Amino acid sequence: MSRRIHWPTVRSQAKRLFGWTVVVVVILFAAAVVFLGTPYEPPAETVQTVEADEEVTLSAYNGGYLLEPAAVDDADRTDGLVFYPGARVEPSGYVESLAPLASEANLTVVIPKMPTNLAVTDYAIARTGLRADAATRAMNDHDAIENWYIGGHSMGGAMACRYARSNADALDGLLLYASYCDQDISDSDLAVLSVAGEADTVLTWDTYERNLANLPADATVETLPDVNHTQFGSYRFQRGDDPSGTSYEEAHQRLNDVVLAWFESQRRG
C-alpha cells in the first residue's frame, strides 16, 4: 500500500531548505567579498621611499600606479611595461621592486588595479566584450610609447601571457615573475624573460617546469638564489610562502640585475 504524500510537510521542508540555501550563499558571498577585499599590501614606507626618489616620478593611475623616469624627456620615453599584480596583491606591492625599471631602464611602468584584486577577473570581463583588458586601456592612455612589454607576477603573469598570446602584434615582449604561460606562445616573435625564485614555496614547480615548453625557444629563463614568492614585490605574509633568509632589498637587487640586463639586451638586439 503506497504512502500518501503529505504536501504541507513537503512544502514546509522545501521552504526550510531554500532558506538555508540562501543563508549559505549569503555567507559564502560575504566571505568572498571580505577575502577579495583585503588584499596584500606592502609596508607604507616602501611607497614613500619611491616617492622620495628623485630619479622616479610616481603617480596614481586609475586605482593603480604609474612609474616614469624623472630625468628623461617625454620624446625619449619610447618603452613601456604594463605589469599585472599577483592574486590579491595591491598595485602598491610592486612599486618598490619595479622602480629601477623606470629609473635605470627608462621604462614607463603601469601597474593597473585589477577588479576584485584578481587579474583573472579582468581577463574574464574583457572576454565578455564589456570593456578592454587592463593592458589595452593602459597602452591607449599612453599612446606616445612606441615599444610595449607586458608582464606580471604569479597569476598576474599567467594572465599577462594570455594577453600576449592574443595581442602579440601589439607587443615587443613578455616578462614573467614567479609565473608561467599556461598557453602556447612558442611560435610567437615575442622576447620573453621568465624569472623564478629558488626559495619560492608558493609556485607549483612541476607545473612551472612543464610549461616552459610553451615559451619561445630563445626565451631567457633565470632562477634567483634564496628568493621567495613575495620578494618579487614588497608585500609580506602570503600563505604558504616560507622565509627565504634574504632581505627584500637584496632580493630586489638580484631580480633587477637580471631584468635590467635583459632590457638592455633587447635594445642592443
Image (spheres, helix red, strand yellow):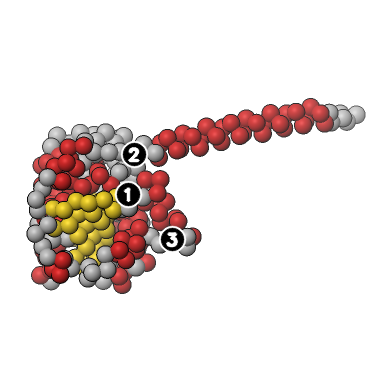
Q: Residues within 10 Å of mark 2 (few under 14, many from 20)?
A: some
Q: Is residue 198 above or below residue 138?
A: above
Q: Secondary structure at mark 1?
A: loop
Residue 32 place in picture, x, y as percent:
45, 37
Considering only order in the chain, which callout, 1 or 3, is on the residue closer to the N terminus?
1
**Residue 113 in the figure: left or right of residue 13:** left
Instruction: Name the residue located 41 percent from the left edge and 56 percent from the top edge.
Output: 123
**Which residue ends up furthest to the right in the rendered image?**
1
- Front residue of 122 and 238: 122
Circle 3/circle 1 CB separation < 8 Å: no
How far, Cα to Cα, is label 2 from label 1? 14 Å
Marks 2/3: CA–CA distance: 23 Å
According to the picture, the residue beneath numbered tag 3 turns out to be: 131
Query: Residue 124 in the image: x percent, y percent?
Result: 44, 55
Vertical order, 136 against 47 (above or below): below
The image shows residue 109 at horizontal and vertical percentages of: 22, 57
**Relative to 225, residue 162 above or below:** below
Q: Which mark is residue 39?
A: 2
Name the side, left or right, on which 84 lies relative to 43: right
Q: Residue at horizontal 42%, vertical 51%?
A: 121
Locate the C terminus and report the quarter of the image it occupies.
bottom left
Residue at 23% x, 60% y is 81
Q: Which labelled disc corresponds to residue 63? A: 1
First reached walking from the N terminus: tag 2 or tag 3: 2
Q: Amino acid at mark 1?
A: Gly
Q: Bin the neighbour count of mark 3 within 10 Å (Cα to Cα): few under 14, some 14-19, many 20 and up.
A: few
